Structures are given as C-alpha cells and as structure tokens.
Image (cartoon, helix red, strand yellow):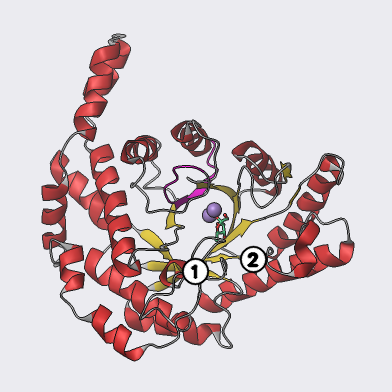
Amino acid sequence: MTELAAVKAALKTQAVETPSWAYGNSGTRFKVFAQAGVPRDPFEKLDDAAKVHEFTGVAPTVALHIPWDRVDDYAALAAHAEKRGVRIGAINSNTFQDDAYKLGSVCHPDPAVRRKAVDHLLECVDIMDATGSHDLKLWFADGTNYPGQDDVRSRQDRLAEGLAEVYERLGEGQRMLLEYKLFEPAFYTTDVPDWGTAYAHCLKLGEKAQVVVDTGHHAPGTNIEFIVATLLREGKLGGFDFNSRFYADDDLMVGAADPFQLFRIMYEVVRGDGFTSDVAFMLDQCHNIEAKIPAIIRSVMNVQEATAKALLVDGPALAAAQAAGDVLEANAVLMDAYNTDVRPLLREVREEMGLEPEPLKAYRSCGWAEKVVAERVGGQQAGWGA
Ligand code: LRH
Ligand code: MN
Ligand code: MN
C-alpha cells in the first residue's frame, strides 16, 4: 500500500460517536433556545444521528444518556438504530440531577444515597446488555463547595467502593470509562478532578476500567496531548469526549476553538497506535444557538481533518530531525502536516466511500431539515439548562 493509500484507509475506518443529547434542545443556565424540528424522543434522536452517519460515513454509533434517553424497551431502541444504519454506543450515567444528589452521589456521606447512585450505574449496565453497548461512561458531579464540608479521603474510599461494585457487574467485552473534570458543579473539591485521580481508580479496578479525556474539562493551558500520550502508553485511554472550550466546559464544536490543539491530540493518538486500539472517539457537545445536525456534521469533519493531518506527519523525517537535535526542522515537519489543506483528500476519501464529497451541502439539500420541522412539534430538551 502506498503511504497515501494507508492514510485513506485509516480515514475510511475512523469512527466518531455522536451524543444523543446534542440532537436535543440545550442551552446555558440562563436560557434554552428551542429549535424547530428537534427530536421528541430517543428514537428520533437516532433518526437524526443516522443522517450524520449517512452523509459523513464515519459516525456509526450514538451515545445515550440515562435517564435522558430512558425508554421502556431498550432492545427496541437498539433495533431501531440498526434499522437506520447506526448502533448504540456508550451508555452515559447521570447521578447529578436528582435532589438526593445535592451532596454527591457515589461519594455522598449517606449510604442510602450511595446505594441509589450505584443502583443507577448497575441499571446502566443492564441497558448495555439490552442494547449491545460495550462502554459504560461515568462522570460524577460529586465534590464539595467549602473547605471542611466533607472528608476528602473518605469520599475517595466511597468512590472506590461504588466503582468496584459496578466493575464486578461488567460482562464480557464491557468496559467502564471514567471521566474527570476539574470543577463544576462543585467549586472547591471535585472527587474525580483530573486524569491522575481517574487513572489511580482505574488502575486499581483492573483492565476493564479506562480513562475518558473530555477536552473541555481542564484548566486553561493544560497540555492535553501529553495526557493522551501518557494514558495511551499505559493502555488506559478509553476514549474522548470531544468539544471546544474558550473558557470552561463550553461544549462548543470540536476543532472550533483550537484546531491546532485537536491536531496535536490526534497526532499523539496516531503516534500511540490509538486507532488500532479500542479508543472511543466520542463527541460531547451542545448546540445552543446553531442548527444541530449541521453542527454535528461539521464537528465530525473537524475531527476527520485533524486526523488526516496527523496521519500525514512524515514519521521518518520527524524521527531523524529529533535524533539530530534539529529543533526547528522537527517542528517544521509537524507544522508542514498541520498546514496541509486536507479537504481535497477528504473529498476523495468520501467519493471512494460512495458518499457526496461535501457532507454539509449534501445534508442541506436532502430535505431532512424541512421534513422534521414539519413533522416534529415539541422537541425534547437535551436534559439540562432549563
Ligand atoms: C459533564 C459532561 C459529562 C456528562 C455530559 C453531559 O460536564 O462532560 O460527560 O455526561 O457532560
Ligand atoms: Mn463529557
Ligand atoms: Mn463536560
């Protein structure tokens, strides 16, 4: 295979998972701007996700968030996905929107609340069984607002205990993906604030536990690609929640705020064989003011463009420059790849996949947006922000 053929082959097998909640109405804590035609239930979210896959060819799975996507019959939901040409991806737990969770969920000082939280996580594994999903994605809003509010060490013990119970329940081929976040909603301590804490818990739990890097969950200036490289080296990178941030957890389209950072991350993924291992490339975004399906298509394309550039890095030239201590040349090799216009290459890749070369143009002219605006009245909110 020529080098270019190998790049194209990698791009064709890329899989970006889209989040069900990105298809629903969402907003900030100040206002949810409702849009016409948004899905009214999880089945319709899958219909929209299928459109993203139809026009990009690389978005075959859809993450669910429970209870936002609660249905009576999960097997029916999975069958619906299959009929539309997509599959159910990660099951995201939600232990942050019940009154009971004011002081935390799995780290709560009251064992009854911890029980409720762990039961919810176990329910999520049941949903994985019913839908064929193999990833349980855990993010905890747990933390404290004031020094002294609770014992930091005891909270870690409670977390470890809860995670261990859920870990034991995982079946063959199922994973637990633990996501960290620096702050919010807790403002003093967060119980899983960083990759180190997530890594320590995952290491203790075992092979089926891995870390999720949400690109919006770091302090400004954090070198995320270094974290990616480290986790990959340790076999502990389970996946990404991709999005962009300008300030905090902004959940904007990935690659919008800092495409160079996305390229650097994807380069470490390529360098660490992340494409051949089981890393889940998920989006975790909210489209508050922009049209949702086109925004998700744009996001998938942004990931593709960063990936294409990362794949184009001239590895031998880079290694030679690095070995020679040629700082400027090494940097130039990387920047050459970053500055390549990969859009013609991606148009070619799509045509070879039997797709329209311009996914956004193709989507806009397919009539889906007009159809759902006419048919769907009373779109569902993504779950928060009201
Ligand atoms: C938390 C988070 C986590 C949740 C999602 C809705 O900020 O990133 O992944 O499940 O947002
Ligand atoms: Mn996330
Ligand atoms: Mn987030």
Taking 172 as reference, is 82 left or right?
Answer: left
237 lies above or below 362: above
- The residue mark sitting in front, 2 or 1, is 1
Give how far across and how far down residue 369 sits, in percent: 27, 78
Relative image position of residue 73 (x, y in whole percent): 56, 87
Residue 127 within the magenta-colored segment of the rendering:
no
Q: Residue at x 15, y 61 (%)?
A: 358
Q: Which residue appears at 40% of the width and 36% of the height?
A: 272
> Which residue extends farthest top?
325
Residue 21 as seen in the image, left or right of residue 85: right
Relative to 54, is 211 above or below? Answer: above
Q: Is residue 337 in view? A: yes
Mark 1 residue type = Val
- Amino acid type, callout 2: Asn
Residue 53 to residue 224: above or below: below
Return the residue at label 2: 94
Viewer-nearest residue: 247 or 312: 247
Viewer-closest of 153 and 173: 153
Quarter-of-image position of residue 317: top left
Q: Which residues are magenta?
A: 234-247
- Farthest residue toward the bottom? 375
**Earlier residue among tags 2 and 1:** 1
Residue labelled 2 has its Cβ within 8 Å of some atom of ligand 1: yes
Q: Using residue 144 as the reference point, say whether residue 239 is left or right of it.
A: left
- Residue that numbered label 1 is attached to: 32
Coordinates of residue 229 in the picture (x, y in percent): 46, 34
> Does the magenta-highlighted stretch encompass residue 243?
yes
Q: Residue furthest front?
A: 30
The answer to whether mark 2 and mark 1 are in CB contact below 8 A is no
